[in-house]
Each structure stands twice: as C-alpha cells, then as structure tokens.
C-alpha cells in the first residue's frame, strides 16, 4: 500500500501580530505627542535629527568643511562648530550668546567696543573676535550669513556722514561683511596656503560675497526698551506723589526716593547702551530643496 504523502503546513506567522501591535503603539505615541505640542520648525528639526541619530547610530558631525548643509539646526548638524563657538563664548565671559531660533543659529556679541564711536570703523578688539568666529562659521558651513548692525538712542552728530542711526547701523553691518570677505579672507588664504594647494580648501567658495547679507537694525530696539523703562520709573514717581499727598511719607523722603529713581534710570540707560554696542550674526537654516 503506497505511503500517504505528508501535507506541508506553512509556519504560522504569529510574529506579525506582535509586530503590528508595536507599530500601532508607536503610531499612537507619535500622534499623541503631535496633538499635545505646538510645532516650532526649529525645535521640530532638532527632534528629527535626534531620532535619526538614535535610530541609525550615526553621531552628529564634527568640525568639517562639507560642501552642503541640511535644514537641521547648527547645534545638532555641526556639533563641532557649536562646541568651538561655545569655547570662544567662555573666553569672552558672558559677552557672547548663542541661540537657536526657527530661522537659524544666531551669535549675539555685545557690551564691547566694536566700532569707533559714531562711526562704522571696526576696532582692533572687534577684528580679533570677528576673526575667531568668522573662520569657524564661514569655513565650516555653507549657509547664508546675515550680519545685523545696531546703533544706540543717541542721535548722530550734525557733521556725521550718516543721515541717521538707520544709516549708521547699516554701515556697521556692511563693515563686518567687508572685513569677512576681504581682510579675513586674505589672512586665511595665507594661513591655509598648504590646504589650498592640496585642493582641501577653496577661499573663493567659502568667502563668496553672495553668502553675506548686511542688515541695519537702527535704534528702534533700544528706544523701545528705554521707553518701557521710562514709563516704569514715571509710574513709581506717581505712586510717591500719592503717598506724599496722603502723608504716608514726608517731603524729604519723597525727594530722596525721586533722586534714587533718577539714578536708577541713568544706570539702566548706561547698561542698555552697553548692550547695544552689538553685532549679531545669523547663520540661516537652509531648507531642503
């Protein structure tokens, strides 16, 4: 009697149930996160980069002069660049702030004599700092760089070549761009001559003037802050007048307090003017094409 052939039974794909459950739970988790949050393009990019690094096992890139940059923030996409900038910020003890914004990474330099008073002429101190920062952000990124120049609340002198503080702030931003594209470029061309000859560095590419956009911020920012400060001081003076009328304080106490408020206002004004001795460099985030 012939033997019966065993029928082949396909293995049960029980693992598919576990896999589908896992995918469903992950989808639910991310939908929940999305529903609970307000999406910020800058923060969203940081999350994307973090997840990509975790899932692929690829750490953030280091200080390298690549030919392209994605839409990721500088803090995550060029970690070596960011760390080098932080080292310079520590060296200048609180005069440099680095922030990540939706439009890109901004380097705020303030409370320094960047320019000869009332002019757009860069000081030696300013050139030293701009040289340190410029060689990093120019030679290790390919992003557009916006340079923001500022002026304080004091009007330009009658004999100034600048018609207003708007003109002065724009000239200051342009002076920084000129320093980068001419003086710093010449210096780095000499310093990196061996790299140029070996084909590892092209100054014409990184110091291309089309990368740089000078922007004059005028004096409206400091004037807004000063107006808010003035209103706050005036309100406190009005409260003192009311206390005096109600005999809660005597006249000597009133005049002493008013003098203290005037001194406080002058001190704050000096601090604000120091803060607006300032240059901002925005490293624009490049969007995916």
Image: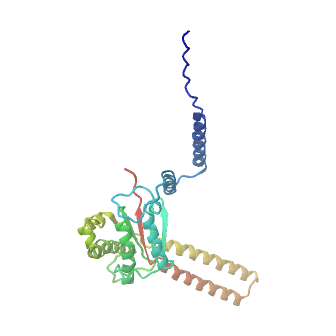
Q: Position of residue 3 (x, y in %)?
A: 55, 14
Residue 234 location (% of width, % of height): 61, 77
Looking at the image, the residue that sits furthest to the right is: 247
- Image-based side of 172 in relation to 32, left or right: left
> Residue 167: which quarter of the image?
bottom left
Which residue is rendered at x = 34% and y = 77% of the image? 162
Residue occupying image coordinates x 36% and y 76%: 131
Question: At 57% from the left edge and 34% from the top edge, which residue is drawn?
Answer: 16
One can see residue 166 in this view? no
Quadrant assignment for the N terminus? top right
Task: Classify residue 177 by image quadrant.
Answer: bottom left
View extreme (left): residue:
197
Location of residue 157 by image quarter = bottom left
Left or right? Give the position of 65 relative to 54.
Answer: left
Q: Nearer the viewer, residue 272 or 79?
A: 79
Q: Residue shown at 74%/85% (left/top)?
A: 249
């Amino acid at each position: 009697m012939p033997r019966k052939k065993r029928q082949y039974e396909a293995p049960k794909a029980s693992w598919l149930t576990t896999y589908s459950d896992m995918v469903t739970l992950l989808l639910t988790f991310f939908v929940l996160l999305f529903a609970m949050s307000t999406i910020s393009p800058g923060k969203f990019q940081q999350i994307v980069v973090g997840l990509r690094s975790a899932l692929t096992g690829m750490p953030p890139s280091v200080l390298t002069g690549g030919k392209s940059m994605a839409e990721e923030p500088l803090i995550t996409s060029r970690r070596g660049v960011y760390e080098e900038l932080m080292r310079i910020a520590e060296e200048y003890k609180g005069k440099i702030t680095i922030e990540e914004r939706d439009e890109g990474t901004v380097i705020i330099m303030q409370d320094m004599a960047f320019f000869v008073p009332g002019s757009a002429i860069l000081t030696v101190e300013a050139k030293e700092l701009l040289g340190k920062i410029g060689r990093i952000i120019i030679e290790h990124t390919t992003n557009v760089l916006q340079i923001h120049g500022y002026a304080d609340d004091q009007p330009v002198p009658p004999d100034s070549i600048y018609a207003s503080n708007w003109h002065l702030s724009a000239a200051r931003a342009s002076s920084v761009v000129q320093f980068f594209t001419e003086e710093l470029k010449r210096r780095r061309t000499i310093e990196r001559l061996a790299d140029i000859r070996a084909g590892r560095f092209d100054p014409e590419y990184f110091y291309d003037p089309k990368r740089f956009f000078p922007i004059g911020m005028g004096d409206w920012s400091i004037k807004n802050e000063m107006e808010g400060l003035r209103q706050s001081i005036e309100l406190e003076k009005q409260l003192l007048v009311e206390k005096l009328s109600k005999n809660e304080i005597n006249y000597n106490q009133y005049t002493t307090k008013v003098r203290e408020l005037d001194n406080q206002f002058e001190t704050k004004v000096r601090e604000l003017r120091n803060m607006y001795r300032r240059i901002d460099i925005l490293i624009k985030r490049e969007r995916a094409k």
